[in-house]
Image (cartoon, helix red, strand yellow):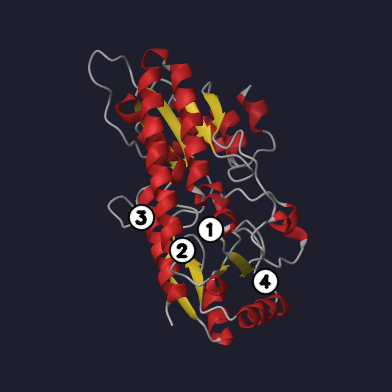
Amino acid sequence: MVLILCIGMGWIALLVAFVLGLSACNSFGTVRPSQAPASPGAGPPIAVVTTFSILADIARVVGGDRVIVANLVGPGQDTHTFQPSPSDAGALARADLTIEHGLGFDVWLEKLFVASGSRARRIVATAGIEPFRPEHRTDGAAQKVDEHDAEVDPHVWHDPRLVGQIALTIAEALSARDPANAATYRERANRYVTELNQLDAWIVTRVETVPPSRRALVTNHDSLGYFARRYGFRVVATVLGGVSTEASEPSAAAVAEVIRDIRSAAVPAIFAENVSNPRILARVAQEAGVRVAPPLYTDALDAPGGRADTYVKMMRYNVDVIVEALAAP
């Protein structure tokens, strides 16, 4: 069975062998555990695997001490280009529940999940959320159609209201697994939704300090479409030209076009990202005569203890950077 599974799957074969060697293990802490066991008498905690750091934060908020979260793509890492390790397969093999983002963001999970032999229930966090494609934006941006524009934009977390929907989806999944504590999960999710609504209102207020004509965004990859749609920004250009950081390095002609777009829109600053190489962006900024703002946390949280190590802190940090960069004379 294992041999058949390994045929044509390359690195997956090594993961399968590793998982089989771990089959007798009872612990769940091999991949960045985040929580202590649940209170005595409350029953065993739920072993949850999340695919990337923002989902892990949401799961911890909703699950509290009733969950032990093992996260695959850590803080500061790029989910688009992630390469799983044997310990990631081991965590999946012992999981009760796996929470993936969906919308083409963590497609590598499929092979890894099958190879691990996991029997965990798989939950797609974005189920029920209507995504949009770059050419279908309603933010007023004059987007050029290219081969990347057929992709669905997966970066829904840049709209706090959609993160509220994800929290409720996770609460329902935990409730199905642990009905005795369903009321607790739903209460925690509802409290988090209230906090996210307050965050959304704060962002609206902060953005009002930026003149509408200066609400223009340029980033490495197309990561802020949902943010732009919600808060009235224009996505003027992206250096890589698509929703994934896997896009190949742009041609000289493509870079020249981005520079023309920046100059035409009179963009005062462009934004680096914590998961992208800033080299090309720096070159574009220099030739366009604009400055590069401090890096935004677009696809991953900061390391624990950092300025953006939770989703709420990440959004507050990003908004402050964007507003200060664009509102400044």
Asked if marks 3 and 1 touch (Cβ < 8 Å), the reply is no
Relative image position of residue 121 (x, y in whole percent): 53, 23
The amino acid type, in three-letter code, at marker 4 is: Pro
* Amino acid, disc 3: Ala
Q: Judge depth for marks 2 and 3 and give the one in front.
A: 2
195 or 298: which is nearer to us? 195
Mark with earlier residue (3, 1): 1
Residue at (61% x, 60% y) in the render: 222
Q: Position of residue 20 (x, y in %)?
A: 49, 25
**Which class describes the residues within 10 Å of circle 4: few (<14), some (14-19), or many (20+)?**
few
The residue under the point 58% across, 84% down is 288
If you read the primary sequence from the N terminus, does the residue marked by circle 1 or circle 2 appear first? Answer: 2
Badge 1 vs badge 2, beta-carbon distance below 8 Å: yes
Mark 4 — residue? 250
Mark 4 vs mark 3: in front: 3
Residue at the spot of label 2: 207
Q: CA distance from mark 4 to mark 3?
A: 30 Å
Quadrant containing the C terminus in the rendered view = bottom left
Asked whether disc 4 touches disc 2, contact meaning CB atoms under 8 Å apart, the reply is no
Please give the name of the residue rendered at 65% of the width and 38% of the height, measured from the top-left corner: 9
The residue to which callout 3 is attached is 308
Asked if the residue at tag 4 contacts the one at tag 1, i.e. Cβ–Cβ closer than 8 Å, the answer is no
